[in-house]
Image (cartoon, rainbow, N blue to C red):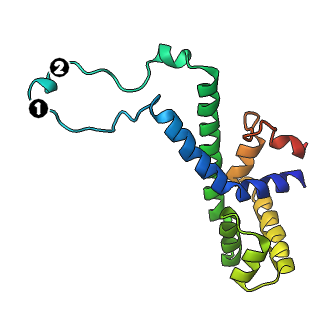
Amino acid sequence: MGLRLDIEMSIRSYSFYKKEIRRLQRSLVYRFPNPHAGLVAQSGIDSVMPQGSPGKSFPELVEMDRKEQRQFERLLRFEELVHAIEKDAELLEKEEDLILYECMMDEMSYREIAIHMGYNRNKIRQMKEEMLSALCQKCQKCQMLHVLTSENSKLYDGREVGAATS
């Protein structure tokens, strides 16, 4: 039951992960600028003058402070989890399951989903349980399962996600 709860909480936290990814990217962008940004040809003397390399060199990356390292690692974990959540939506075969999945990704409450889909809350809960069961049965293809159970996967609060499943 722990894994199903972890999967459900990850789906419901999708919007949070997306917002946190944007925040971390903004926070880290001046430390790791996009090397392809601002690719405009220069003319005159500026075109022949040596240009500094964008971003940090390897020695600078090694010397990053602990906060930057944590932020960068969290960014990578959240990007992997968001990708897995989006990819696992493709595993759902029924259209109603996909709509429920997307509503959960949008952090809609059971009441809001019930109104949106025209069912009562108990029916929505039952549909959610069936959808999660279907995802868990497709474990071999489930990207989120691999992310959640990997030994390096941790949520933002530092709690081991896969620990509840053992």
Check residue 43 in the rendering and tell me which mark sits there, or answer none: 1
- Indicate the position of residue 88 as horizontal and vertical percent values: 66, 58
Q: So how many labels did they put on this image? A: 2
Identity of the residue drawn at 30% across and 20% down: 52
> Which residue is nearer to you in this view: 105 or 46?
46
Check residue 49 in the rendering and tell me which mark sits there, or answer none: 2
- Indicate the position of residue 75 as horizontal and vertical percent values: 60, 38
Q: Quadrant of residue 48?
A: top left
Q: Is residue 166 left or right of residue 76?
A: right
Identity of the residue drawn at 33% across and 37% down: 36
Task: Locate the N terminus and report the quarter of the image it occupies.
Answer: bottom right
Q: Is label 2 in a helix, a strand or a loop?
A: loop
Q: Amino acid at mark 1?
A: Ser
- Indicate the position of residue 25 as horizontal and vertical percent values: 52, 40
User: Residues under labels 2 and 1: Cα distance?
Assistant: 10 Å
Identity of the residue drawn at 66% across and 52% down: 16
Check residue 144 in the rendering and tell me which mark sits there, or answer none: none
> Which residue is nearer to you in this view: 164 or 68?
68
